[in-house]
Amino acid sequence: MRYRTFSEADYPAMQALDLTLQRQDPAFDSLPERERDGRLHTSQPALKFYERSEHSFVAEEGDTLAGFILAQPVWQGDRPLVLVRTVSVLPGAPEGTSTGLLHAAVKSAYDTAVYEVHFTLTPDLLDAATSESAVVTGQSAVCHLGTRADTAPGTRLRSVPANPAPGTPEQGA
């Protein structure tokens, strides 16, 4: 699997994947056009914006686009953070695709001296969040990077050993 920044040449494949995922909701095609457009993450202006963000990536397996992550830097108070808008993965994509996409965004954040990555924790991102030792508060997860990871509030997700001892919690405090 290869993770890389995307370009305009990737837009059609990203838009097709986004549409495929939206159509998993059987009611999608019966919605008014404006509502359908509002649910898509990959309008041309949005993709141009995320392409310049430095924190958005695609995953490709051979010639196939397996997924993408759209993320942007934002300021929260006196510090920057990276906010993940969406992670979209092709049904049947290789295991670990979403984990690799999140890791690419986390690495790009760290490389630009941004020490927090925020995203909505969905079932598809649980393994990715665990691999990044994300902190969970409600439906949100935050990857704290550098020394902030030691003092962040919330419940830290940790990898579970293959055969945990009886009574061992799956999540650390």
Image (tube, rainbow, N blue to C red):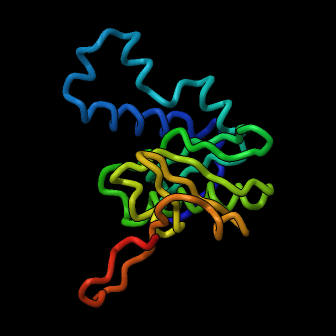
Q: Residue at x 33, y 36 (%)?
A: 20
x%, y% of residue 72? Answer: 66, 40
x%, y% of residue 128? Answer: 46, 62
Q: Residue at x 71, y 57 (%)?
A: 115
- Where is 161 relative to 134, above or below? below
- Where is 37 relative to 108, above or below? above
In the displayed structure image, the side of residue 151 where residue 32 appears, left or right: left
Rendering quarter of residue 75: top right
Rendering quarter of residue 171: bottom left
In the displayed structure image, the side of residue 26 where residue 124 appears, left or right: right
In the displayed structure image, the side of residue 30 where residue 135 appears, left or right: right
For the image, the number of numbered tags is 0
x%, y% of residue 65? Answer: 47, 50
- Whether residue 21 is visible: yes
- Where is 150 relative to 65, above or below? below
- Where is 162 relative to 109, above or below? below
In the displayed structure image, the side of residue 134 where residue 4 appears, left or right: right
Q: Residue at x 46, y 62 (%)?
A: 155
- Whether residue 87 is visible: no
Rendering quarter of residue 94: bottom left
x%, y% of residue 14? Answer: 49, 39
Q: Residue at x 65, y 70 (%)?
A: 150
Q: Nearer the viewer, residue 50 or 116?
A: 116
